[in-house]
Image (cartoon, rainbow, N blue to C red):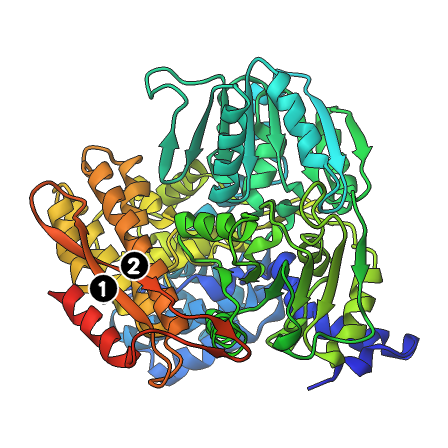
Amino acid sequence: MFSSEDFLHGYDKTDLFAKKRSGFANRFAKIDVLALDEVVQPQKVPLEKHVNIELEGVQSSLSRQVISSILDRFARDVNIRDLAATQNITKNIFQKAFQSFRMSCCLGQTSLDPRLQVIFSDIIKYDHSVDQIYPYFLRHAHKVFPHLERINELRIISDLTHPHNWYPLAREIHRKIIFHAGPTNSGKTYEALEEFKKAKSGMYCGPLRLLAFEIYERINKDGIPCDMVTGEQRLFAHDSETPAAHCTYTAEMVPIDDRRDICVIDEIQMLRDVERGTAWTRALLGVAADEVHLCGEEAAIDLVLKLLDPIGEHVDVRKYERKGELVVIDTHGLRDLSAVQDGDCIIHFNKQSILKTARTLLHEYGKESAIIFGDLPPETKREQIEKFNDPENPCKILLATLSIGMGINLNIKRVIFTTLMKDGQIFPTFFVKQIAGRAGRFASLYCKGEVMTLLDEDSRLLGRLMNEPIQPIAQAGISPSFEAIELFSLHLPHCSLSQLLDIFASISSVSEDYFSCSHARIREMAILIEHIPLSLRDRYTFCLCPINNNGTSFLSTAYIMIVKKYSEGNAITIQFIKHLVMGEMRLADNLERLRTLGDVYDILYAYLWLSYRFEDYFPNRDLVRELQVECGDLINKSIQLMILKESSKKSANIIIRKLPYNEKGNEKRNSIILKKDGKMGGKQQQFAAKDFENNFRFVVEKLKK
């Protein structure tokens, strides 16, 4: 392991620095696509039966050894291999096809195709050229690899070199493009939203559900009716029958067939993202708006200009400077959690370290902290953000993962990195700067921000990263449409969806300004439900469902059961969903149980997402949403309990009171309210109850019942 000192002295360390960070940076750059040879699998070809005919002058009986010798000469002939290459038979495919062809000839020696029998005989008797075998080899190769017959058509379908032609409605408009470029906290999004509010109709698209909701609330608060559309939720200023002229979207949901006066595309630099970049590219090229306002890093300017140049659209670039000072402390680290101050945000990279820090801050220093991590339910994130931002709330420390990097407004004074590396790779400059920029938000409690590290040895590396310019983005992500995959399937009817995706990725062509986004997550989902009979369109839709398939048995099994029930033509009711999840709907007292609760939340999220695609089969959206809120509440309380549960000697006063259950009837549910008694002082936190462990187990047992 290299220390950060390795990167601080002169040009001789530059290459080492670049290598050290390249692995992580590649997650935001072009991905490697498997070659077609590695994707397609040879098909088994049954032996052909031919009547053994006695022909004059033709050797009727050929030994296996003789046939093998002739075929060996055929396979070694350079001209034969060159000819095969011109017909899309690569070296790897040639070898596999030849092995099958040789086996069919040698095993079927007693009933060879009479024409091949004549050719073999002439080669033996008259030393004819072995290239006469080629037409028969080619026919066999097409049976072993069916795609070879249709490779030219497949290449035409998978041509992604002109994506701007995919959006005819947008091409009917000569759009006005304004790029608001600047760092975090420069006011660029504010300026774009001011134009959004002035327009008669508009769309906003951003990277997070939480951000779409924040803008939705802000616009409505300003007296402008605005709806919200995310993958799993619809909110209306009026009602579903009376859509508002303004609407906020997550990037994947923004429509390209809806004409509006203005569209704001936030965090445009996300078009470099390996998995989600295609959503921003689609929005940039495809939104049908008279004015398109882009907000993001200056690093995206050159690429945006190049992408829009073939369309003939001019880009008006407006650059912004950061509002408020950001001080980089690169001389030392925080060193110890005792030095934590109000307004600090400590950046972690997993839930376990967040919970550990939260326990230490509470039990050793009497400081409560808000928590935000990636797969925390949006409602819980919102509660934590409001708690941290509220001047009247005593919670003044935020523990977060990288999920705070985009858009969310937070009253942060200092950003403190616990590390600048993950899996041995240094974070990219743009990544560090975006998170660091969350400190010192303009017009907040802390107009002057600071960024530093926890450890002394990382401080100088932070200084170097913060002083480095962000490299211009070279390529934008792109993905094929379902229609292209469907056309593929017509030519390759025996291929599974995962195979279709692999073959498409291996032969697709993109221009130098684009890269093919990763299809790994969709492919994993396709393999998961491969055995369930579905139409290609339905299968593809189920694979698009954005749940985190982390390989846990509960999540995989539950999702398979939902898809299977749909495939049988049955509705997925609230009773069925409860049967799936209620056994896991209980408080978590460890990380494994917390992950399972997160999986339950994901399954409920999947139901809501699918209910907007298959409404007749997912009829209980509102009831499932209530269950999801309850699950989010359990996750929130579990985190609180896990923070309080430091040891059996430390305890909490747990008050159990009964609250109405969320369903009709007289059922009740237990809710836990954690109440701290006594005063916090020094490094000790006194609690009223004497035995926290016993109380905690008692609560869990009560909830089980």
Q: Residue at x 32, y 40 (%)?
A: 537
With 690 as the anchor, is 230 left or right in this view? right
Q: CA distance from mark 2 to mark 1?
A: 7 Å
> Which label was assigned to residue 89?
none
Q: Residue at x 81, y 82 (%)?
A: 6
Badge 1 is on which residue? 586
Badge 2 is on which residue? 634
Q: Amino acid at mark 1?
A: Arg
User: Residue 86: horizontal and vertical position, in percent?
Assistant: 59, 55
Q: Amino acid at mark 2?
A: Leu
Q: Residue at x 67, y 73 (%)?
A: 339
Check disc 2: other Cα within 10 Å, few if <14, some if 14-19, many if 20+: many
Choose the circle earlier in sequence order: 2 or 1.
1
With 449 as the anchor, is 261 left or right in this view? left
Check disc 1: other Cα within 10 Å, few if <14, some if 14-19, many if 20+: many
User: Residue 143: horizontal and vertical position, in percent?
Assistant: 36, 57
Asked if residue 46 is positioned above or below residue 646 in the image, the reply reads above
User: Residue 562: horizontal and vertical position, in percent?
Assistant: 20, 51
**What quarter of the picture does the C terminus occupy?**
bottom left
Asked if residue 22 is positioned above or below residue 609 in the image, the reply reads below
Q: Nearer the viewer, residue 359 or 533?
A: 359
